[in-house]
Amino acid sequence: MAEETDPGWRKLSEEVLSGMKEWRQAHPKATFREIEEAVTQRMSRLTARLIQDLALSSPASDWRSQALSERPQCPQCATPLQARGNRLRHLQSTGGQDIELTRTYGTCPTCGAGLFPPG
């Protein structure tokens, strides 16, 4: 994991916490459900950032230098994939937050299937 990741998580955590304090002051009569929804919405930003950073720290995000026998395999024919460069992948967390991952994209030299290997 990159050294700058932890301070980034800390900064975002502090923004979430201070944002909740401000929200609560602006909504003194909020119901339990409204408070829960506000917390969930703000925490989803932190959750998405953690997921993104942890996924990018995985060896599966860049497997170009791995030996052929260690590379991800085609799910259709089990042939090791060939790397086709890095590509940006857009995903959405269960909390509705956008996540961007730059990962190695691969194609199967046997059947032509193309994919981002899991991990």
Image: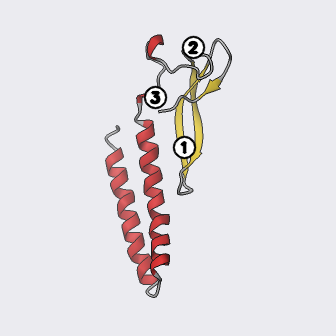
Location of residue 39 (image quadrant): bottom left
Q: Are marks 3 and 1 in contact (CB under 8 Å)?
A: no
Q: Residues within 10 Å of mark 2 (few under 14, many from 20)?
A: some
Label 2 or label 1, whichever lies nearer to me, is 2
Residue sitting at x 48%, y 71%:
38
CA distance for labels 2 and 1: 27 Å
Q: Amino acid at mark 1?
A: Glu
Q: How is the image coloured?
A: secondary structure
State whether residue 86 is above or below residue 95: above
Q: Is residue 3 left or right of residue 112?
A: left
Q: Secondary structure at mark 3?
A: helix
x and y, in percent, of residue 1 in the image:
34, 37
x and y, in percent, of residue 9 in the image:
36, 52
Q: Amino acid at mark 2?
A: Thr
**Residue denoted by label 2:** 79
x and y, in percent, of residue 69 in the image:
46, 12
Q: Secondary structure at mark 1?
A: strand
Residue sitting at x 37%, y 67%:
17
Residue sitting at x 56%, y 16%:
78
State whether residue 30 is above or below residue 2: below
Precedes in sequence: disc 2 or disc 1: 2
**Residue denoted by label 3:** 60
Q: Residues within 10 Å of mark 1 (few under 14, many from 20)?
A: some
x and y, in percent, of residue 106 in the image:
58, 22
Q: Secondary structure at mark 2?
A: loop
**Residue denoted by label 1:** 100
